[in-house]
Image (cartoon, helix red, strand yellow):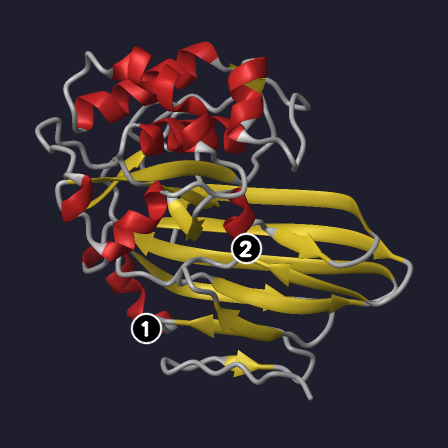
Amino acid sequence: MPFELSFPDGGQIAPDGKFTRSTYTVSDKFILTSEAFGMLVRVGCQFEFETMETTPSVWQVRVHPNDDQLIVSETWEPPVPTRSYVDPYGNQCDRVNLPPGRSLTRYDATIDMAPNPDETDEKVVAAAVEDLPDEAFIYLLPSRFCWPDMLHDPAWELFEHVEPGWPRVQAVCEWVHEQIRYEVGASTAMTTAYDVWQSRAGVCRDLTQLGITLCRALNVPARYVAGYLPDIDVDPPDLPMDFCSWFEAWLDDRWWTFDPRNNERRSGRVVIAKGRDALDTAMVTTWGSAELKLMTVWAEEVTDVG
């Protein structure tokens, strides 16, 4: 039996597992420009897979439910009925049994969020390990792709002289941004942060995981964030839009955003998932042979609400 999705704020669920929901009605359009957080961002993706047989998979492409990003409208179109669950990190996960042959999965959402760039406070300090709350402490530990014990000595050699807290984490970001060459194809899904430390090349996930590993080696909890990042108030890169990653570091008594790939404060970050590293936030994980034929990602500011 297909898992039935339901939404307390209303929505439409089709027998095939697809759904569309909207927070606002047409008569509420004034809210989008006067009473909302201040900026609308449209995000989404489309995947085309080919499989020889029914192939179980888990997806994390839908927007993470949190107070900083209100889902105005959302459409989820899997090829078959799905089952959904929330993982231990609070991420929305969808189980999809991909049918034999070619299948298309599409997601599209409009998000209401603050237009401000990532928050900055150069005065926040690092908490002592013994004072860390449990929710942060677990992000000091090694994980599948982040091995802080392997980079403990190099991390302290590089950053011991930098003031603990914000300045030290920012120094980590700057070092990774400057020393690790962004190169598509330089890594695989199995590449660890230590591999990237040695090769000095990688993509977004690799730079993020190396930043996380160095922070953990310096006793700063850090967690991986996967999401959509539109090119707002920046020059767009000469690359197709793709999923993005960055990390959050625990300083004082909260999480702060850092981005070693771009190394700048950005607007419009839409979170999909958070976890220890890329393993916990993978867009699609399959059990069986599934060949990805096409992937398209979009993320852009909505400037015309009609």
Q: In which quarter of the image is the C terminus?
A: bottom left
* Residue furthest bottom in the image: 1
- In the picture of the structure, the residue carrying the numbered disc 1 is 27
Q: What residue type is labelled 1?
A: Ser
Above or below, 156 relative to 64: above
| Image coords of residue 154 (percent x, y) | 38, 15
- In the rendered structure, the answer to whether residue 6 lies left or right of residue 127 reads right
- In the rendered structure, the answer to whether residue 128 lies left or right of residue 302 reads left
Label 1 and label 2: CA atoms lie apart by 29 Å
- In the rendered structure, the answer to whether residue 126 lies left or right of residue 298 reads left
Element at badge 2? Answer: loop
Element at badge 1? Answer: helix
Above or below, 83 relative to 133: below
Q: How many labels does the image show?
A: 2
Say which residue appears at 22% left-offset and 39% top-offset.
116
Say which residue appears at 18% left-offset and 21% top-offset.
167
Disc with the residue nearer the chain's start (1 vs 2): 1
Identify the image quadrant of residue 249: top left
Identify the image quadrant of residue 129: top left
| Image coords of residue 37 (percent x, y) | 23, 54
Q: Residues within 10 Å of mark 2 (few under 14, many from 20)?
A: many
Question: Do we see residue 39 in this rendering?
Answer: no
| Image coords of residue 157 (percent x, y) | 31, 12
Q: Which mark is residue 61?
A: 2
**Are the residues flagged by discs 1 and 2 in contact, CB closer than 8 Å?**
no
Q: Which amino acid does label 2 sit on?
A: Val
- Give the camera-side residue of 172 and 71: 172
